Amino acid sequence: MKLKELKLKNPYLSLPEACYDRAKPTPLNKPFMIHTNQAVAQMLEIDEEELGTDAMVDFVNGALKPEGSDPFAMCYAGHQFGHFVPRLGDGRAINIGTIKGWHLQLKGAGVTKYSRSGDGRAVLRSSIREYLMSEAMHGLGIETTRALALIGADHSVRREEWEKGAIVLRVSPSWIRFGTFEYFAHKKMYAELEALADYAIAESYPHLMDEKEKYFHFFTEVMGKTARLMAQWQAVGFQHGVMNTDNMSIHGLTIDYGPYAFLDEYDFNNICNHTDTQGRYSFGNQPTIGEWNLRALMTALSPLVSIERLQKSIAHYGRLYTREYLYQMGRKIGLERVGERDIDLIKHMLGTLQSLGIDYTLFFRTLSRYDGERSELLKLGLYHTPMNEWLDSYDARLRENELSVEDRHATMLQANPKYVLKNYMLQEAIDAAEQGDYSIIDDLFRIAQNPYAEHPEFERWAVATPDIHKNRKLSCSS
Ligand code: AMP
Ligand code: MG
């Protein structure tokens, strides 16, 4: 379909008016296309030829209003670092409408009613990070929002210093956050709360619409999806960095990419967000915070369903999380029937990685070709004894494994990415982009889409993170 043939819908506007505020995008000066995502264009049934046109730049810049579009910003609250903030909302993201169930949003398109003291803009570096990482998560098979395109502009934005503004056109099956429910519960606006719950059920869990206890089942499904998402993040070594309840998706998606990081060397206590002095959102804390956030959602839903009922549901969180985490880790180490008896083996492995400071991604990719010959694995750490001891236990466990060596290797090569987008790689793309060279964005995009493939031309990124780039912390200011 051509851009001018698009007909957008606005289902969110069927909710009570307190849920949103109409907001007009403020286009950036002198915009230009940096990157487009053909897979997402296909999903939206937008013709590939349209991606290279000026109209596409205008579309992402909010300067071309498609038919049916009635732009608005969503209202929400949230617990930020454990403290309740009664009103947040889309301060710099403007919804322009829905195509085939995908809600399109322009992030960085100017101020809205919810901008507070912010300027409604997003800078180039954070927009590159969001654009690339959402595609990388999708490539890894982890549920996430996605993005159609990234534009830059000759438009200065004030942060600690002057930077260039950018806009990502991001898409999602749902932009509702735990904090969206908290907003109405806190204000005791129960009619709106109920309307929102019904809307979220219809949008994300339509099979529950006619259930007698639909709000209870709704919470249970969100809980299950969150437990699964946390297990996937832990298994792949992803750290979100700002797990505030306003950054938690009711649809179980990874949303709002900020100061995130993939682990370099394995460190359970890693903190990637500069502002997170207490380590609330440290790598190892994420599953616990997932549960904490679900409890905040539970409180917000309590006017619709008794808290005692919801308590029964959340009591299963730990079990669901562990089951999914074991499943994920079982694939990573090539065990066919992973179970609770393997917990010690996995803990021993992680302890070994932690004590030897071994690169998390490289370890699993190397292990994916293990056939009893240990030298490649031993090379990853300075001392051999801890790795040898773990491999002794692993060998013993493999003797009971029903998979053939070939099948084990094949499973593991599909479970252990050769490439993840580490912060130093993203920084390389950002540094080049700030000089007007966008080629590294495209390189990273290609490995993001296919992280399990070999890509011999990008071998330099399939290594342990260089020491000077390890465990970089990023700030929220983006
Ligand atoms: P975040 O930390 O990006 O999840 O943002 C938290 C809240 O601050 C959300 O309500 C955002 O919309 C808002 N916000 C972040 N940056 C800006 C900005 N530059 N202008 C306006 N609002 C912003
Ligand atoms: Mg956010």
Image (spheres, helix red, strand yellow):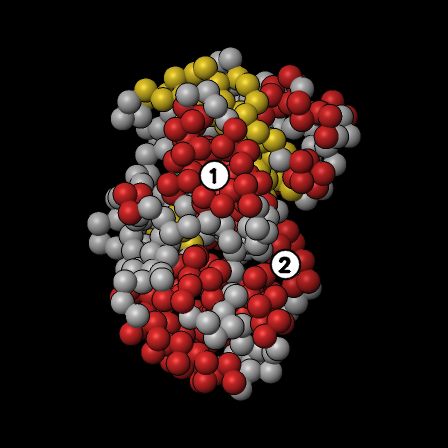
Q: Position of residue 430 (x, y in %)?
A: 41, 31
Disc with the residue nearer the chain's start (1 vs 2): 1
User: Mark 2: which amino acid?
Assistant: Tyr
Q: Is residue 131 above or below residue 196?
A: above
Q: Quadrant of residue 11?
A: top right
Task: Give the quarter of the figure containing the C terminus.
Answer: top left
> Label 1: which residue?
130
The one of 210 and 4 positioned closer to us in this rendering: 4
Can you identify the residue that label 2 sits on? 205
When the figure is inspected, residue 475 is found, relative to residue 253, above or below; the finding is above
Vertical arrangement, residue 453 with respect to residue 314, above or below? above
Residue 68 visible: yes
For label 1, count other residues whose C-alpha is less than 10 Å away and answer few (under 14), some (14-19) or many (20+): many
Asked if residue 333 is positioned above or below residue 303 in the image, the reply reads: below
Disc tally is: 2
Residue at point 60% right, 82% down?
Answer: 402
Is residue 244 visible to the viewer in this orientation of the structure? no
Question: Which of labels 1 and 2 is toward the front?
Answer: 1
Q: Residue at x 56, y 62 (%)?
A: 413
The quarter of the displayed image where residue 294 is located: bottom left
Query: Could you tell me how far apart the alpha carbons at marks 1 and 2 are, in whole angstroms?
Result: 26 Å
- The reply to whether the C-beta atoms of the residues labelled 1 and 2 are less than 8 Å apart is no
The N terminus is located in which quarter?
top right
Residue occupying the far top of the picture: 30
- What kind of residue is marked 1? Glu
Camera-side residue of 118 and 183: 118
